[in-house]
Amino acid sequence: MNEGSTPVTQASRPLRISVIGTNYLGANTAAGMAEFGFDVIGVEIDENRVKLLNDGKAPLYEPGLDPLLKKHVDSGRLRFTSDYQEVGDWADVHFICVGTPQSDGSDAADLSQVHSVVDLLAPLLTRPALVVGRSTVPVGTSAVVEQRFHAEAPAGTGIEIAWQPEFLREAHGVDDTLHPDRLVFGVRSEQAEHRLREVFATPIAEGSPVVVCNRPTAELVKGGANAFLATKISFINALAEMCEATGADVSQLADALGLDQRIGRGMLNAGPGYGGGCLPKDLRAFMARAGELGVEEVITLLREVDDINQRRRSRIVHVTHELLGTDWVGRNVTVLGAAFKAGTDDVRDSPALDVAGRIQLHGATVTVYDPEAMDNARRVRPTLRYAASAQEACQEAHVVLHLTEWPEFRELDPVQLKSVVETPLMIDARLSLDPQAWRNAGWTYRAPGRP
Ligand code: UGA
């Protein structure tokens, strides 16, 4: 790690950390850094969000995050601002935690938020500092970002860029921040490595393994991890197609495969496929970057992963069609779940809402219920109907689709629910209800991938 060592400040006081961007990643990072004992300022251009955060409230539903924010806003160790001036010379380490969504009209990542951080922060950096990217970016981004800091910051080459990808899972963000299963430091100097070891001293002392590597490797670790997780999900969903053709049970198959420690049971739940703000867009950005680099074979592999994922959604619509018959007009379809997975209110690229929208396009009346994601769902799919409870959503339903695996759906009473629906048809796309209980209560129970 000795290509051109850049000075990194040695502060005698506790480290000061800025976290730029305070959505899911940034809010967790800022609260986590305060919990590690540092003085933290979160920078956010949205004034409303700054107010919310300064009251100790996260801008999204994430279990455990509000109490941690509140704890450190109250302790004085954490505050939020919309003013970059406040952090320019104040912080020793700046974390970039802005979003990198899919670009409009292409598979590539949209890096405009990362570049606007450079636009606003670089002119304010008059003393040496470490800037650490945590956003998920295409391989090669940190080098470009560093060139810009060197050219545009008064401290010039005194600014070093490291990349330290995050592996936070929504609904487990606080735990994954405080107790990471690994820390990847993509650095080009020993000083940067030492500074990152200082920042993450608490989890390192607890035993979190550290991988120190160059920056392209760190950038690829994140993209590669998400591409692999997506591949694993699509692999089991491809096997679900085999199960449907043969009468095999994909859940038992996954259990048996997962007992082989080389395979592992994680990410082997068959269902409506992966969604959310990460796996779908990261897989596509990975393919787009592979294309730019001329590594076409990677695209061939991952394109199929994406196609299998889309097929699962079509398959659920198809099974609904099989059960309802050809005429969908006047049919009531209940969709249980709107979030892309349980434990979050995030509906980005949610399989549940996608399937609900497709069924509505066929002419059915679709009513959705989700315990946490109703507001977000209404915003992105205003034409669907929404109910205040699972019970209400199921009134006079001709078919019920279980599309997000919230625990409360597993606790529904099939006997009681049968009395409110028009026809007792259940499509358990998450394969997590008890088939026997539903069948015993008189329901036609279908779970694609299970006999
Ligand atoms: C994912 C990764 O798991 C994190 O490690 C990563 O840090 C994060 O993206 C990110 O890039 O920031 P997340 O999007 O929160 O985290 O969700 P996952 O728990 O991975 O689930 C993704 C999707 O796959 C969900 O739609 C979920 O329902 C689906 N899934 C998951 C399955 O269909 N089967 C499974 O066995 C597991």
Image (cartoon, grey):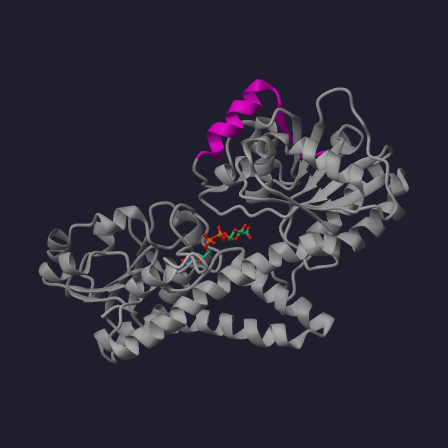
Instruction: Please check the rendered image and state whether residue 176 is part of the magenta-colored stretch, yes or no.
Output: no
Q: Quadrant of the C terminus?
A: bottom left
- Who is closer to the viewer here, 34 or 180? 180
Report the span colored magenta. 64-83
Horizontally, is 328 left or right of 139 in the view? left
In this view, 294 is above or below 172: below
Residue 435 shown left or right of residue 274 in the figure: left
Question: Percent from the top left, x then y, of residue 36?
Answer: 60, 28
**Residue at image location 68% in from the left, 67% down from the top:** 289
What is the quadrant of residue 308 in the picture?
A: bottom left
**Quadrant housing residue 443:** bottom left
Q: Position of residue 333 (x, y in %)?
A: 26, 64
Measured from the top left, where is residue 224 in percent x and y? 60, 60
- Does the image show residue 362? no
Residue 311 visible, this angle = yes
Q: Is residue 413 above or below residue 248?
A: above
In the displayed structure, 174 sits above or below 37; it is: below
| x then y, percent, for residue 397 | 20, 62
Residue at image coords 67%, 32%:
199
